[in-house]
Image (cartoon, helix red, strand yellow):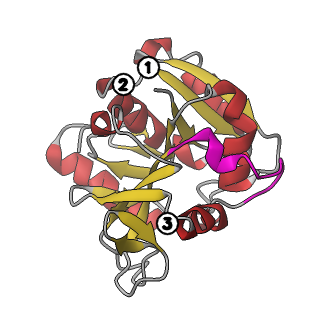
Amino acid sequence: MKAMLLAAGRGERMRPLTNRQPKPLLMVGGEPLIVHLLENLRDAGFSDIVINVAHLGSQIIDYLGDGRRFGVSIAYSDEGETPLETAGGIIRALPLLDNKPFLVVNGDIATNFPFKTLKQREIDLAHLVLVNNPEHHPSGDFGFNGDLLSDSVAEKYTFSGIGLYHPDLFAESRQGTLKLAPILREAMRLNRVSGEIFNGFWMDIGTPQRLKELDHLYQQRGTHHV
């Protein structure tokens, strides 16, 4: 199974840190955010990685190269100067992802999620990892209707930015700038999206303050595996 890291966003809320550097290259615990994720994926047995880039993306390509020094093989999907949003970026990268289910991980999260548990999972159109709602996102995104996910239930959790997708999820979608949430909601209406709750360590590094908190955590633990 291939894995895709989403690294094309502009990181507007991280300014001024992202004026000259893409968010995935921001340092935490002595390494860029994206390297922590790469190492987690490698250790879970994912060796073929696709990374989409846009804003200042050449810096990511220069830093990571072909991935060999991190023990993986990296292919890049370059979106130019304007990011295509999550679904648009995935659709652009589909030719690099083979015609079978693949893992997608947001490039601006930190987590100790056991990615290897997803390698053998059978899915329909999508399988999402949800987490308890953080303070900055109290209302959540999706909830459970049995084993399946729905956006019309009372108790909702936050989408972690970790998901398995079948290429068929995007079969009806056009190329170009496109958000992922509406596509997922439509698949949920068709009862074709499963999910799980993860209660381990997870942070969305959306602001300079959260980047500082994460860096402090790494320093406390004295290791780059949170």
Distance between the Cα atoms at labels 1 and 3?
30 Å
> Whole-percent x and y of residue 71?
40, 15
Packing grade of label 1 (10 A; few <14, some 14-19, many >=20) is many
Packing grade of label 2 (10 A; few <14, some 14-19, many >=20) is many
- Disc 3 target residue: 207
Q: Pick out the residue farthest to the bottom.
A: 154
Q: Name the front one of labels 2 and 3.
A: 2
- Amino acid at the residue labelled 1: Ser
Q: Is label 1 in a helix, a strand or a loop?
A: loop
What's drawn in magenta, residue-wise?
165-178
Q: Pick out the residue farthest to the left.
A: 221
Q: Is label 2 in a helix, a strand or a loop?
A: helix
**Observer-nearest residue: 46 or 225?**
46
Q: Name the front one of labels 1 and 3.
A: 1
Is residue 50 visible in this depiction of the protein? Answer: yes
Q: Is residue 36 left or right of residue 49?
A: left
- Disc 2 target residue: 42
- Disc 1 target residue: 47
